[in-house]
Amino acid sequence: MKFIGKAFLGGCFGCLGAWIMTVLVITLLGAIFATTIGPGLIKSVTGFVSSIPNLVSSSVNNSVQGLFSGGDQEGTNPQAAFHFANFTCPNNPPPELKIFATSPNDPTAEHLTQIVSDQVTSTHFWVQSPQGVTVKFALVLTMPDGKTRIWGPSDDSVFTSDPGGLPFTVGSFGSPVPTGQYKITIYLCDTVTGSSLNFQVTP
């Protein structure tokens, strides 16, 4: 009976000790997590959640930018966002360059100020300078939301006028674009413009 009693009491105290040790270990691990790993993990999760709107906004902006054949500079004010340091401002008065759009690939066709949405990628834009004028220029596209971007190939968006006075194509939209009012402005340098074309894309 003494042996049984000692065995019973030893088992009870052993189980109680194991239970107490388990509680102490769990409490200790919880305290370590709360003071070290926990705050960093919470900050990481919070930072990721707060960055989701920025990621979505950036993705949408990149998708919109990809619709155009222009470079990748963008802003809300052409003179503030773009700098044409390699351009020499012409002497007054600046040459009057003409910019227009046609539906067929023919500069003698009807000049357009309204373009149907499903025909926007087949519309060609042209620039014509006075005969004997050779000047470098860039084109800035203003979109319906007021944002602006360089128009032209992304590797070299600088154009040179034809001294023969003949119109030459400066490209077209690479993909369908939202409907609304657009404007393409010819910049001869940071502060001087040659002319501009206002046109509307309709449904």
Image (cartoon, grey):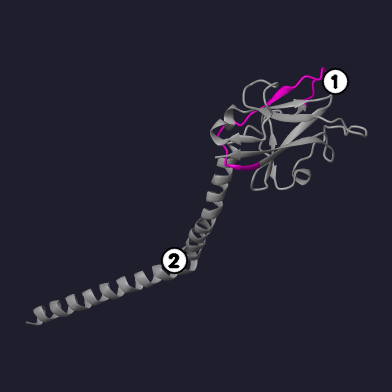
The residue lying toward the viewer, choosing from 48 and 200, is 200
The C terminus lies in which quarter of the figure?
top right
Left or right, 62 with reference to 31:
right
> Main structural element of the magenta stretch: helix, strand or loop?
loop
Residue at left offset 82%, top offset 17%: 164
Left or right, 57 with reference to 185:
left
Instruction: For residue 157, say whether it is visible.
Output: no
User: How far apart, in angstroms, are the residues tagged by discs 1 and 2?
Assistant: 78 Å
Q: Position of residue 131 (x, y in %)?
A: 85, 20
Q: Residues within 10 Å of mark 1 (few under 14, many from 20)?
A: few
Q: Which mark is residue 33?
A: 2
Q: Position of residue 133 (x, y in %)?
A: 86, 23
Q: Which residue is most to the right?
A: 92
SS at mark 2?
Answer: helix
The N terminus lies in which quarter of the figure?
bottom left
Q: Which residue is most to the top?
A: 164
Looking at the image, is mark 1 or mark 2 earlier in the sequence?
2
Q: Which mark is residue 9?
A: none
Q: Is residue 104 magenta?
A: no
Occupied quadrant, residue 94: top right
| In the depicted structure, whether residue 107 falls above or below residue 63 | above
Q: Which residues are magenta?
A: 160-181
Q: Position of residue 84 (x, y in %)?
A: 80, 36
The residue lying toward the viewer, choosing from 110 and 24, is 110
SS at mark 1?
Answer: loop
Determine which residue is flagged by label 1: 131
Q: Which residue is most to the front?
A: 110
User: Between tags 1 and 2, which lies in front?
Assistant: 1
- Residue type (three-letter) at the residue carrying disc 2: Phe
